[in-house]
Amino acid sequence: MQKPKRKLHMLFIGTLLAILIIFINSTIGSMGGGNKKGEESREVSALEQALMKIEGIGEVFIYTHSEPKDESSPLTDYFSVSGTKSEKQNPLQGILVVAEGADNPMTKNKIKRILSAVLQLPEHRIVVEEMNKRGIYIESE
């Protein structure tokens, strides 16, 4: 009578252990997925800080638009007709920059050229707009 109970207990403990391992693995995997977003926001923040240090540019806000990534199978390139692997395209599709000092056309052009070079993005995909002036703004009469 002792043996069947012992086998049942071992089976139960094994099942609990397997469920625990699956749970831990899934929570660690979900934490790793958020790392990409954090890395992207750090890059955007660093880019904003660098742009603010350029003469003629004040406060800067950057919004990026990225193409959603397709989860492809590892065998996609294996079964392709051509022998070359598909090139990785830039997932960044466009960028909006709102900056103080962008009312000056030379500054706006400078921002576009810099971002085009840094992000490897064509200039027509970069939009630069002037930031609203905050606080009391008195026009001279």
Image (cartoon, rainbow, N blue to C red):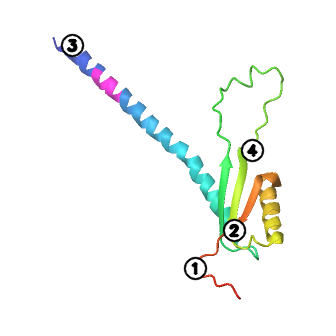
- Magenta region: which residues? 12-17
Q: Which residue is mark 3?
A: 3
Q: Amino acid at mark 4?
A: Asn
Q: Is 13 part of what is drawn in magenta? A: yes
Q: Residue at (41%, 37%) from the top-left corner?
A: 24
Q: Residue at (44%, 39%) from the top-left corner?
A: 27
The reply to whether discs 4 and 1 touch (Cβ–Cβ < 8 Å) is no
Of pointers 2 and 4, the one earlier in the residue sequence: 4
Frontmost of labels 4 and 1 is: 1
Of pointers 4 and 1, the one earlier in the residue sequence: 4
Q: Nearer the viewer, residue 129 or 26?
A: 129
The reply to whether discs 1 and 2 touch (Cβ–Cβ < 8 Å) is no
Q: Which residue is mark 1?
A: 135
Q: Amino acid at mark 3?
A: Lys
Secondary element under disc 2, as helix, strand or loop, is strand
Left or right for 137, reference 22: right
Secondary element under disc 3, as helix, strand or loop, is helix
Please provide percent x and percent y for residue 28: 47, 40
The reply to whether discs 3 and 2 touch (Cβ–Cβ < 8 Å) is no
Q: Which residue is mark 2?
A: 99
- Mark 3 → mark 2, Cα distance in angstroms: 76 Å
Of pointers 1 and 2, the one earlier in the residue sequence: 2
Q: Nearer the viewer, residue 56 or 10?
A: 56
Q: Quadrant of the C terminus?
A: bottom right
Q: Is 30 part of what is drawn in magenta? A: no
